[in-house]
Image (cartoon, rainbow, N blue to C red):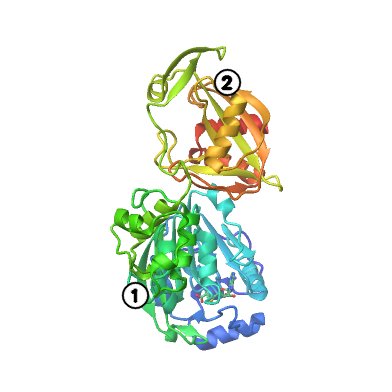
Amino acid sequence: MIMEPSLTKTQSNYDLQEFLSGFNSDSKVKTILNKIGVRPSRALGQNFLIDASVSKSIVEGLNIESNDTIVEIGPGLGALTRHLIGKVKKLVLVEYDRRIYEYLREVLSGVDGVDVCHQDAVSFDVRPLYAEDTVKIIGNLPYSCGTEIIRNFLTFPSPVDSAVFMLQKEVVNRFCAVPRTKSYGVLTVMTCAFWNVERLQDLTFQSFTPKPAVDSAVIRLFPCDSDKYPPFNQRVLKRIDKCGFHERRKQLKKRLPLGDTNWGELCKEMNLQETARAEELSINEWINMARFLDDNPLKDNPQKSSEMFDVVDENDKVVDQMERSRVHSEGLLHRAVHVFVFNKSGDLYLQKRSVLKDSSPGLWDSSVSGHLDLSEEYHCAAIRELTEELGVSLGVDFICSIKPSENTGWEFVRLYKCEHNGPFNLPYSEIEGGGFFPIDMIGNWVQERPEDFASGFVECWNSYVN
Ligand code: SAM
């Protein structure tokens, strides 16, 4: 049932009630397209859904709730949009066709909570979405760039909580493929390593106007549980996957960039046939292969509870040395550094902590942070942590000192900064991923959702901006 949307004003050349009722026939779609001056473009995948029950069932697949922020990609004439209006907190419509965008902006100008954007969804900036509570994406995607759009929204780490997409059937087959089939490939592995993919329904060309040349299908994606796979390096997985599937019938030992790795030993360790081909490896086996071939020295080393720290007094003078676990459990004063790494544009790199960390697992944090080793100077620790966590050797500049509190985890913190544009070589047992964010975007995100951040970062952030 369509709820009555809340209106602030009603001036428009177009009829909102007609829009909300839907354009459910060839002739209705033709009439409105003529009115707004659009000739359907094949390059923009402009095949419009005219089957109302299909539109409704696609939206139902997203399981929307009143507090959701929904981004609809390619809303077109609103076949899906009209089932979303009035039902969610915020609806963002991303439409590339200028005339359709202008039509939507006008017809929906009086509807609260709807934001119409004239943008290419392939390069839409997803980062502001982190400040929203629950973000769901939906779209009957243009076939020409559907996978590019999905990559933009769902590449990990992503602010998206779930997604429903309609794509051409052949592409859906690739998302849902199993090993030893023709459709199984890089797209399958790189998606399913992060997302559960469910096929919801198949559709024929009859549901659209103009009729597309191919059939379509609908998928739902939601993030894999954090313990489904062990931590791995996304860049290594992508590199070996691309090499492996480049000539899918060739044996992997002839295709993979093995460096000094002994293929026989790797196969023995992973319980693989030495003659294995790319299409024979499960997602799990691909991930284990990426872990094996990752040359980061800290890849399997989140933290050791037996690590020793200097314990300090309220004047930051060393008074004792104790094991990490005891220092933390007893709330003893100790020392740490944070480093803010900025790129040339002044954006700050934030890291997403691994779910394996013993403190603030899975939360967003400073570019680099860590404890001082025994008898280590703050400045030296900052440089060492930069190398260990991001794989870069750089000098750092002091910003400020922060007094210990519950929020810093009873750490005396010194905050430093430096400049680097990435990319970084992350130890995946410590850091799941990261990205550069403009300062004002972080400010808004911290304000809207402080629970997404390690409390030590929030202390550093507040000291930095104030
Ligand atoms: N949602 C409508 C429906 O189901 O009838 C229209 C779907 S139609 C297959 C694809 C829509 O995506 C069109 O409105 C087209 O103009 C828009 N589009 C094409 N390329 C786009 C892009 N790169 N970014 C955003 N929208 C795009």
Above or below, 463 relative to 262: above
Q: What residue is rendered at 39% in x and 31% in y?
A: 304
Q: Is label 2 within 8 A of ligand 1 (CB to nearest ligand atom)?
A: no
The answer to whether residue 35 is left or right of residue 149 is right
Q: Is residue 388 left or right of residue 347?
A: left
Label 2 – label 1 distance at C-alpha: 58 Å
Asked if 325 appears above or below 50 in the picture, the reply is above
Percent x, y of residue 90: 53, 56
Taking depth in this image into account, of 61 and 294 the one nearest to the observer is 294
Label 2 residue SS: loop
Residue in view at x 66 percent, y 67 percent:
11
Q: Residues within 10 Å of mark 1 (few under 14, many from 20)?
A: few
Where is residue 418 shown, x and y percent of the image?
A: 67, 38
Q: Please count the marks in the image.
A: 2
- Above/below status of 28 relative to 392: below
Mark drawn on residue 403: 2
- Kind of residue indicated by mark 2: Lys
User: For the N terminus, which image quadrant?
Assistant: bottom left
Which callout, 2 or 1, points at the residue further toward the start of the chain? 1
User: Which mark is drawn over residue 181?
Assistant: 1
Q: Quadrant of residue 221?
A: bottom left
From the top left corner, tell me how far across and down residue 190 is, in percent: 44, 62
Q: Quadrant of ligand 1?
A: bottom right
Q: Amino acid at mark 1?
A: Thr
> Left of 185 or right of it: where is 117?
right
Mark in the foreground, 2 or 1:
1
The residue sitting at 52% across, 71% down in the picture is: 146
Query: In this orientation, does residue 463 appear?
Result: yes
